[in-house]
Amino acid sequence: MNILVCIKQVPDTKDVRLDPETNTMSREGVESIMNPFDRYAVEEAVRIREELGGTVTALSMGPPQAVAVLKEAISCGADDGVLVSDRAFAGADTWATSYTLSQAARSLGDFDLILCGKQAIDGDTAQVGPGLACQMEIPFVTCVQKVRSITEELILVERMMDDGFDVVQLPLPALLTVVKDINEPRVPSLKGKMKAKKAEIETLSAADIKADEKCIGLAGSPTQVVNVFTPPPRGDRTVFSGTPEEQVSQLVKQLKNYL
Amino acid sequence: MLIIDSEKCIGCGVCEEDCPFDAITVVDGCAVVNDNCTLCGSCVDTCEPEALHIEGAEKINKVNLEEWSGIWVFAEFRHGAIAPVSFELLGIGRKLADQRGVPLSAILFGSGVEEQTPSLIACGADIVYFADDPQLEYFREDVYGRVLEELVRTHKPEVILAGATAIGRSFIPLVANSLNAGLTADCTQLDIREEDGMLLQTRPAFGGNIMATIECPYSRPQMATVRPKVMKPAEPDPARQGELIRVTPSPEALDSQVQVLETVRSEQDNVNIQEVEILVSGGRGLENEKGFEIIRELAEELGGAVAASRAAVDAGWISYPHQVGQTGKTVCPKLYIACGISGAIQHAVGMQSADTIVAINRDENAPIFDFATYSLVGDLFEIVPILINKIKENRGQ
């Protein structure tokens, strides 16, 4: 079973607070981390390999410093990591990103299973997983909360829905996007960390993956950002004072439309 | 590529401060761009000396925009009912269609769906295209994707709107990818530019800390998903007339090796927290599973549902579908009551667009008080029961 896991480096928001005056997030000193949903994808891939054998390859598209998340994936059990990085990819929307990842995946060989996190926390689109499946022409299921069973030919999963879940069976090769309910990611072992430290991360350019220049970066992106702005700050804020009874009385007055 | 005109650049550093991606630094009095640049364009807008511009490249996926006409709304049908978000989409879809002077169509897939069509026409659809087939009974990405793709290729609509639900967010990206069309996720505002019919799609990015407006200048259809509860639902008018068109998908579109073996509805109290108007949410301050009892009681009194922070879900006090925040769901109810939730940014990004936020927390320095509309400082186990009683009293009057 050869498994590809797609991961993204995103800004960490852990210690950031919203500025109450402007309601904006300060990015100063914010570090980059592996997208939280992708951790679950890496863990699931490693678990499947432990059951069936094979390899786990982590793939990321991003600037050169994204090597860090690929090394992290290796420390968590991935066998190797590959970065696709090129200034020509800048400005890629989800269409161009899906295309680029599919070209990279093809250049790396045949995979039985591709795993992605449900979405990245910086863009929140949840579009690259389905887009990649489309470009690879393989079936897919999103928001998988459990892999019930897997063989070389078939995978049986639970897909989270808004009102419960569906049990879905699909033939391999296939692509899954996963939610955090699927597993409890392991902490990197010392051995894993050593391996990651020594690991050479292969970097592929647009030419290496034989990408059509009209399908990557800004040129390959049907959507274009035409304006970026800070949302208007929230309206007035009121802090009630007094005993719990007094505070609740004031609140109930304000909420009468809802009661 | 971002092009910096070193002649015009005065090294003021506005772009450096403004860049959401830390991609620009001023070196020796001139801006320099690094590999973090995503070509978002925010620096171009704020550069007063106009020293920055983005050089476009030739587009591959150009289509003849004139050939595409009409506004479509995907009406999501599951377990015998049309998802409420579909009627919200018909509301905004009607406005866009009127602005463009084109028909509004609803698209309905499922098994035994014909009886659902009148509600779509009553809520503003001029045409309902419906595909009624046992193969469409359960949602499958590939089948739904191919059937919609066939319809789009035949009728060429200029705009397609779908709910940002589990179903919409799953198969709509497949359709957009197959059609080489642009798709914008989770739009909170949609407008049409009168001159050229461009759909202006505004969405939050970085967990709502930045808003971005997105266009699809060269491709059609222009596709967008919209979160539930963001748009106002259309008022039904049973007297409205419309056209029903039965669609027969090709056998190839319906053929799939993907099988839905079972579909399970959660037994737990209303887990679809994205579709309710009032949410009562509990966090670490509830101390244990039992703490959720008063949260449930308050939610019941208000006719709302129960949500939770990641801390409460990770502690096993309530299931994951109730989780609000970065690794859970994004909600925008009319009223959000946060009980014993500190309000870390990961939680805030999932609920800060609620109309009214009430925070109850013992710690007066909790970040949640920075963005709550109404703040109550104190013990939630004391405050919430008083609140429940007051609501009951109010109702008695």
Image (cartoon, coloured by chain):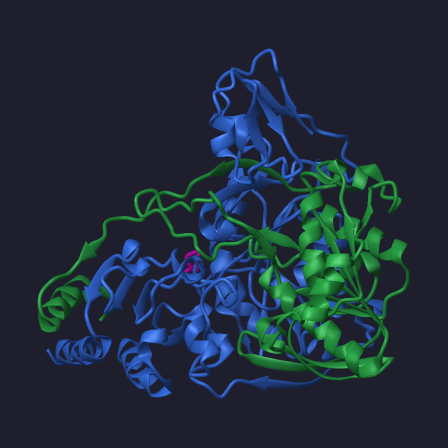
Chain colours: A green, B blue
Task: Please tell me whether residue A51 is drawn above or below residue B162 in the rendered image.
Answer: below
| Residue that appears at 48% across and 33% down | B18
x and y percent of residue B29 in the render? 54, 18
Taking the image as shown, residue B319 lies to the left or right of residue B178, namely left
Say whether residue B392 is visible.
yes
Q: Nearer the viewer, residue A198 or B120?
A: A198
Q: Please give left or right for residue A104 compared with residue A248 in the image.
A: right
Q: Is residue A51 left or right of residue B33?
A: right
Res B246 seen here: no
- Relative to B89, B385 lies left or right: left
Front residue of this view, candidates A33 and B7? A33
B232 is within the stretch colored magenta: yes
Query: Is B307 one of the magenta-colored residues?
Result: no
Q: From the image, which quarter does the C terminus of chain B lie in?
A: bottom left
- Indicate the position of residue A243 as horizontal and vertical percent values: 9, 70
- Furthest toward the top, the residue is B7
Residue extent of the magenta highlight = B230-235
Depth check, front residue: B59 or A117: A117
The quadrant in which residue B161 appears is bottom right
Can you tell which quarter of the image residue B145 is in?
Answer: bottom right
The residue lying at 22 percent from left, 77 percent from top is B384
Residue B34, percent from left and from top: 64, 33
Q: Judge whether A121 appears above or below B198 on screen.
A: below
Give the camera-side residue of B195 and A164.
Answer: A164
Relative to residue B137, is residue A199 depicted above or below? above
Question: Which secondary structure type mostly characterizes the magenta part of the structure?
Answer: loop
| Quarter of the view holding residue B65 | top right
Q: Quadrant of the N terminus of chain B?
A: top right
Residue B217 placed where, x, y %?
Answer: 66, 36
